[in-house]
Amino acid sequence: MTARPENVHQAQLLHLLRDEGARSRAELGDVVQLSRSKLALELDRLAELRLVESAGLAASRGGRRSGIVRVASHLRFVGIDIGVTSIDVAVTNGELEVLGHLSAPADVRDGPAAVFEQALELLGKLRAKGVATEIHGTGIGLPGPVSFREGMPIAPPIMPGWDRFPVRETMSQELGCPVLVDNDVNIMALGELHAGLARSVDDFLLVKIGTGVGCGIVVDGKIYRGVSGSAGDIGHIRVDDHGPVCACGNTGCLEAYFGGAALARDALAAARSQRSPFLAERLAERGALTAEDVSAAAAAGDAAAVQMIREGGRQVGKVLAGLVSFFNPGLVIIAGGVAGLGHTLLAQIRGVVYHRSLPLATGNMPIVLSELGGTAGVIGAARLISDHLLSAPA
Amino acid sequence: MTARPENVHQAQLLHLLRDEGARSRAELGDVVQLSRSKLALELDRLAELRLVESAGLAASRGGRRSGIVRVASHLRFVGIDIGVTSIDVAVTNGELEVLGHLSAPADVRDGPAAVFEQALELLGKLRAKGVATEIHGTGIGLPGPVSFREGMPIAPPIMPGWDRFPVRETMSQELGCPVLVDNDVNIMALGELHAGLARSVDDFLLVKIGTGVGCGIVVDGKIYRGVSGSAGDIGHIRVDDHGPVCACGNTGCLEAYFGGAALARDALAAARSQRSPFLAERLAERGALTAEDVSAAAAAGDAAAVQMIREGGRQVGKVLAGLVSFFNPGLVIIAGGVAGLGHTLLAQIRGVVYHRSLPLATGNMPIVLSELGGTAGVIGAARLISDHLLSAPA
């Protein structure tokens, strides 16, 4: 059992040291609203709790040299990012720097027992390399709706065997440390907040375009989950009353137009009708088509593929334009596997959003592609549990 | 100059007493996380600052009778709600109970000098009745985009002479008290949070359908304003690429379909084409038509008017369905002049939202008509300044 900060001052100091790195006591005194003696008291107490440690002396600022303090170097957090077809596991230090990261293909449909066995195996490999002995906390992201409060997935559509599986309790017992569970989009947003393009942005949106489409909402530097935890579930917003039928049973949902599943469907149609010679050839070679094939086709200049990406970007842009007018974010990040379609997609989304949203809302608002790629999820998962463990008792 | 609470404990106690009414020291001790002696210290200090006062003794809970404390009875807040065609002014006590409320027709296009002269006149009448001597703070709502930080309207479309007029500074000097300024939709949302159907709801949306359409967003019991203050500006979300041209120059905006201006336009067309005998008669009588005439026509069973309301409700519902999936609120309140169209409108909005939004998001989410009517704005404006004055220093 790891110690936790005892009050808001200790929590504030820990967050500062985690996010900004080692600081001298004098520098900390400049930032926090504490008397010199009170600051010394809280730092000493954090050292006793083994949450911070000293790291030498700072250069003199005129008088006595001030001691440098940092987050205790033995702290280790684990981030586990379960995707539909992959598992990522990383170990970080107390500053959430990735000390080791392993990724493996997986199938979420194999159920929680098999998937977590694989995750624990990856973690075992990382530990064997010596990156962690004790683990102080673990964050887990899942590719479907999660009840954050209960720490379990709720009726996830593509995950047989996962409904209400007690992920938090099971993994907490397995790992012997506190665990928090959230959906994959929220942990990616936390990753961007911690180490990505959203570092200095309090209110932003992360739009993940993978097999489906989802949105992470950050308000005032914290994930906004909504009243029943479904906030950001934008894949089934209707973009056209007369659109294609969606897997959910409704018509014209965003996901029925775009995302990995819709792209695979459209790619197959384009291959069969010979509208895309590139995709027809791929289909003949491999017997199936995915969003990655559309990406490759577009890169090779295939007109039908470029058209698919443009049309998809336009639909995402239409939904996003409304959300930007409503939410007035400081930044929109586009991420996820299909974001690999890159600048054609981005250009299309930008065109629609900047044209349609309120000028006041888009004035200084960048729309960018994530630069973290596959690490956003694991860093965000580590951040999720770290935020919890380094916060003051309620 | 009124005293302010000196720390977060004092602020918490003041908010409790304001929102829940007088409480015994023993009852307060049950709710706040303070030792008995610390609680007594903070309450004594608040009494010295003249922010609370004693109000007799509570019934015994077994031992000594505990003293009852309440917000100081001399505290007075003023709420001013400027509409496009009306001014509302109210004076409240420290518990935000309305002690006096006056309303008058006005024309916002007369400019800030004329409008505030009229507002001050109404306030003068209220003071003459003896409801307030000293005023401790004033909140003001304006019917257009407001920079909350700067305390002034920014490029409001229908308010000549108001652009960047320093409302906060001017009125603060005029009234000799702190002033805060926000848009009319946000203050209505605060009114609902304080005294309306949203009292126990942390995350909700207030959709105001007046001349235009706007949305107040409450996150965790606080107004969410977005990065540049334009959050909730949903009137120009596009509902149809091929829709009517909007006053903003784009096509198919929500406001181009519905709201006071769109209804007046459609009413005129229905009257001239004789599709609505009721509206044709009204037009002949009065020479012009408004949203109120559509309401009257619908009440009289006029098919064309009912059709207009249904179609408008459907467009509002389409936009709202997406926002509900995205934001997952605990409650949606429909308010504003056109909300007077009542249950026909509500039924239509409900139908579309419940049909189209994610089931997880709408599961327990009520969609209701405001019950506060004309007082939501003034109560919310008083709450805005009260929240500020009763909060702890940063």
Image: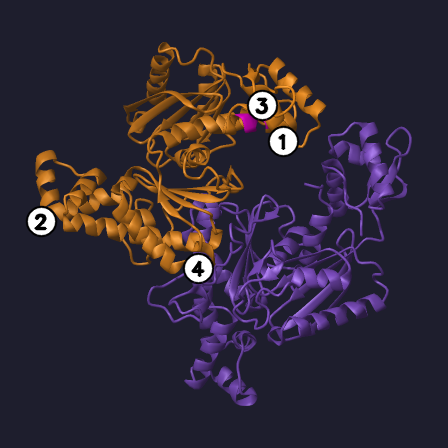
Chain colours: A purple, B orange
Q: Is residue A137 left or right of residue B183?
A: right
For the residues labelled 2 and 1, the Cα–Cα distance comes to 67 Å
State the separation of the CA atoms marked 1 and 4: 39 Å
Q: Earlier in the sequence, mark 1 or mark 4?
A: 1
Which residue does the numbered mark 2 point to in the structure image? B274
**x and y percentages locating residue A87 in the rendered image:** 67, 70
* Circle 1 chain: B
Could you tell me residue B90's position as x and y percent?
A: 38, 22
- Residue B378 magenta-highlighted: no
Among numbered discs 2 and 3, the one appearing first in the sequence: 3
Please indicate, yes or no, whether residue B151 appears anywhere in the rendered image.
no
Chain under numbered label 3? B
Labels 1, 4: front one: 1
Q: Would residue B4 be seen by someone viewing this image from the given angle?
A: yes
- Going by the image, does B157 lie left or right of B286? right
Give the CA distance from mark 2 to mark 3.
66 Å
Which of label 2 and label 3 is nearer to you? 3
Q: Is residue B16 magenta?
A: yes
The first of marks 2 and 1 along the sequence is 1
Q: Which sits earlier in the primary sequence, circle 4 or circle 2?
A: 2
Q: Residue at x 62, y 76 (%)?
A: A110
Q: Are the numbered discs 1 and 4 placed on the same chain, yes or no?
A: yes
Q: CA distance from mark 4 to mark 2?
A: 42 Å
- Mark 2 and mark 3 residues within 8 Å of each other at the beta carbon: no
Which mark, by number, is residue B30?
1
- What's the amino acid at mark 3? Ser
Category of crowding for the residue at label 2, using alpha-carbon neighbours closer than 10 angstroms: few (below 14), some (14–19), many (at least 20): some
